[in-house]
Image: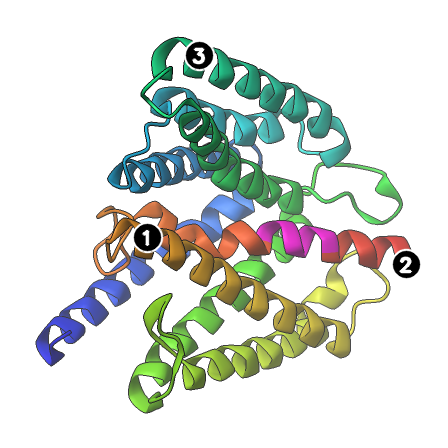
Amino acid sequence: MSPRSANQELLHRWAVAAFGIPLAVWVVWEGGWTLAAVLAVAAGLSARETFALAELRGLKPFGGLGVGAASALVLVAGAAPSFSEAAPLQWGLVSGLVILSLILALFLRWPGGSPLGGAAVTLLGSLYPGACLSFGVFLRHLPPRGGESLAGTGWEGALPLLAVLAVTWTGDALALFLGRRFGRKKLLPQVSPHKTVVGSFASLAGSLLLGGVLGWAVLRFHPSPSASILLGALLGLLLSLGAQLGDLAESALKREAGVKDSGRLLPGHGGALDRFDALLVNFPLAFLFFVALEFFG
């Protein structure tokens, strides 16, 4: 990438961030159907981009079915923001998706249209964004201590999800800027040619530090009595590792398809899948973290 192109991409990133971060904070604050609707759209767009990557490799998923299922998984979470209530409905949806994919593969892909590949990619493309982004809704509506309510109103409900977004995006920014400035040795060049070892460690250090700060200044207001600087730092470390794994996993999909970005939705950021790849891992990971705190605290 030429210096001029790199500078243009950087400007685009700053412009998107200046608009997107306040919008994200408002959406998280609102929670409920506002959050579920935004994440459902993101899940549908990400599913469509996943299917487009598969089609570049000659596979033929059932795109309309998969996009609808990905969005529906998040909307189910919006209707029942408790994981225990949503899980049976989501599993019913997934079971229906499996059956419909197999039926469509039988009648529309057999014998020469790779029925196995079509059905498998439909499931992956739906569950990858749909199931994972639904945990963003579950995070926003974690029950307060003792489980008295699922309302998750005000800062008490918004803080866990905002903390995940802050740590994830801070680590990503540090990896990008410091990796480009000081990085020489590539992390996994066969998967992602631009990610560096310096960028990876910058993400780990920054996320760990920010997590510790949040553990002291913010997460202690969360209902979990065991919130602390140490646990905040641990959350930051886990989220950095999760974000980098999610980023590399998506890079592998793009690498196989032979493209740089999954789409062109956001200037400087690529497609929806490029923007949400880290959160696809970190939403479920953070949910498990907070549930474990409540269980063992």
- Name the side, left or right, on which 134 lies relative to 11: right
Q: Is mark 2 in CB contact (under 8 Å) with mark 1?
A: no
Which circle marks residue 296 in the picture? 2
Front residue (pair 53, 153): 53
Residue under label 3: 106
Task: Give amino acid for label 1.
Answer: Glu
Front residue (pair 261, 220): 261
Magenta highlight on residue 58: no
Tag nearer the camera, 3 or 2: 3
- Name the side, left or right, on which 159 lies relative to 116: right
Residue under label 1: 256
Q: Quadrant of the C terminus?
A: bottom right
Task: Give amino acid for label 3.
Answer: Leu
- Name the side, left or right, on which 191 lies relative to 212: left
Magenta highlight on residue 287: yes
Which element is circle 2 on? helix
82 shown above or below 173 = above
For marks 3 and 2, the one nearer the N-term is 3
Task: Give amino acid for label 2.
Answer: Phe
Front residue (pair 83, 140): 83
Q: Which residues are magenta?
A: 283-288
Give how far apart the Cα atoms at labels 3 and 1 are. 27 Å
Q: Quadrant of the N terminus?
A: bottom left
- Name the side, left or right, on which 132 lies relative to 91: left
Which element is circle 1 on? helix
How far from the left and from the top, in percent, is residue 289? Answer: 73, 58
